[in-house]
Image (spheres, grey):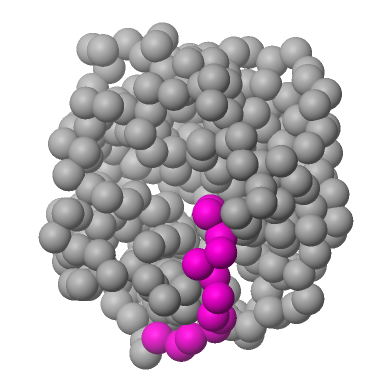
């Protein structure tokens, strides 16, 4: 892993203003990524230990705008929170969340707010990982990828109306992976990809073929077992080419931006936050 750092506005969760409660808003986005405040820059969502869901607006330059704001409460009832892309909404980024009973809920976004949630699945507690890769199979609808307890990887093609086409198995043996990262085109070929960290801490790029399958994987990093959370984002730092970048939190709670992936390497990282170990989920 590259260790180079760069100057950036450090903005940790401990600086969140407790009074800034917007009651669960979510606004327009760009390219299936999370743009909460309609600023056309990528943002980060995070859930704290109390179950509050916060939005950290990005400034498009690898840093933060102030202030972050609270967009919901009671999210500690959820065992997984997934940025689903335009799963149902035409212009806004939706959220999928799994509760403790294994029910899957869609929170569709519209004009900066959530519409009433709808249940879109049951039995999802059988899945050990869930992610939203965007349009993985090339039908212009956002999809979901999930791993079951046997390590099989399943593609759940979305129908863009809050439902599913029949699922398809797209892999096996994925239980050797300790983190799955989706929602991105990491190699700039116009197709959605997946990244995964194995038990040795190696980071792998699995390029999608745009039809629901894979091209040959390549290793893009090592030593990633020091990270307690890894998420993908769009061009959080617009100074770098490419569609997708990576944000990772280490054991000290420091937040790092890896502003470029390419086909076989990561660009030097830069520190963009501290104190993020108080967060129980990053989206």
Report if residue 77 lies within the magenta region: no
> What's drawn in magenta, residue-wise?
167-179
Tell which of 282 and 96 is nearer to you. Answer: 282
User: Position of 97 compared to 103: left or right?
Assistant: right
Q: Quadrant of the N terminus?
A: top right
Displayed quadrant of residue 16? top left
Q: Quadrant of the C terminus?
A: top left
Q: Position of residue 239 (x, y in %)?
A: 80, 33
Residue plotted at (19% across, 63% down): 102
Q: Position of residue 88 (x, y in %)?
A: 35, 66
Residue plotted at (75% across, 13% down): 7
Seen in the picture, residue 51 relative to 198 is either above or below; the reply is above
Tell which of 26 and 275 is nearer to you. Answer: 275
User: Position of 256 compared to 126: left or right?
Assistant: right
Report if residue 172 lies within the magenta region: yes
Q: Position of residue 148 (x, y in %)?
A: 39, 73
Displayed quadrant of residue 25? top left
Residue plotted at (38% across, 28% down): 279
Res 161 visible: yes
Displayed quadrant of residue 160? bottom left
Q: Position of residue 268 (x, y in %)?
A: 82, 32
User: Position of 68 compared to 175: left or right?
Assistant: left
Seen in the picture, residue 170 relative to 124 is either above or below; the reply is below
Tell which of 55 and 170 is nearer to you. Answer: 170
Res 38 visible: no
């Amino acid at each position: 892993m590259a260790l180079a750092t760069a100057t950036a506005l450090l903005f940790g969760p401990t600086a969140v203003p407790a009074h800034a409660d917007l009651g669960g808003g979510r606004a327009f986005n760009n390219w299936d990524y999370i743009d909460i405040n309609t600023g056309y820059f990528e943002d980060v969502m995070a859930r704290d230990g109390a179950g509050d869901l916060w939005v950290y607006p990005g400034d498009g330059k690898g840093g933060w705008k102030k202030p972050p704001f609270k967009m919901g409460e009671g999210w500690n009832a959820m065992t997984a929170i997934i940025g689903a892309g335009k799963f149902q909404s035409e212009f806004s980024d939706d959220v999928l969340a799994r509760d403790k009973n294994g029910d899957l809920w869609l929170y569709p976004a519209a004009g900066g707010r959530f519409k009433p949630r709808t249940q879109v699945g049951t039995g999802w507690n059988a899945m050990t990982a869930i992610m939203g890769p965007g349009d993985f199979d090339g039908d212009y609808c956002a999809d979901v990828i999930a791993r079951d307890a046997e390590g099989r990887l399943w593609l759940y093609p979305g129908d863009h109306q809050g439902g599913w086409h029949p699922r398809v198995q797209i892999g096996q043996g994925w239980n050797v992976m300790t983190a799955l990262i989706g929602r991105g085109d990491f190699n700039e070929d116009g197709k959605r990809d997946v990244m995964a960290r194995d038990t040795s801490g190696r980071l792998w790029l699995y390029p999608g073929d745009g039809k629901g399958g894979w091209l040959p994987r390549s290793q893009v990093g090592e030593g990633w077992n020091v990270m307690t959370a890894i998420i993908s984002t769009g061009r959080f730092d617009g100074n770098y080419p490419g569609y997708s970048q990576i944000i990772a939190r280490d054991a000290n709670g420091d937040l790092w931006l890896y502003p470029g992936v390419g086909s076989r390497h990561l660009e030097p990282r830069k520190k963009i936050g501290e104190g993020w170990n108080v967060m129980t989920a990053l989206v």
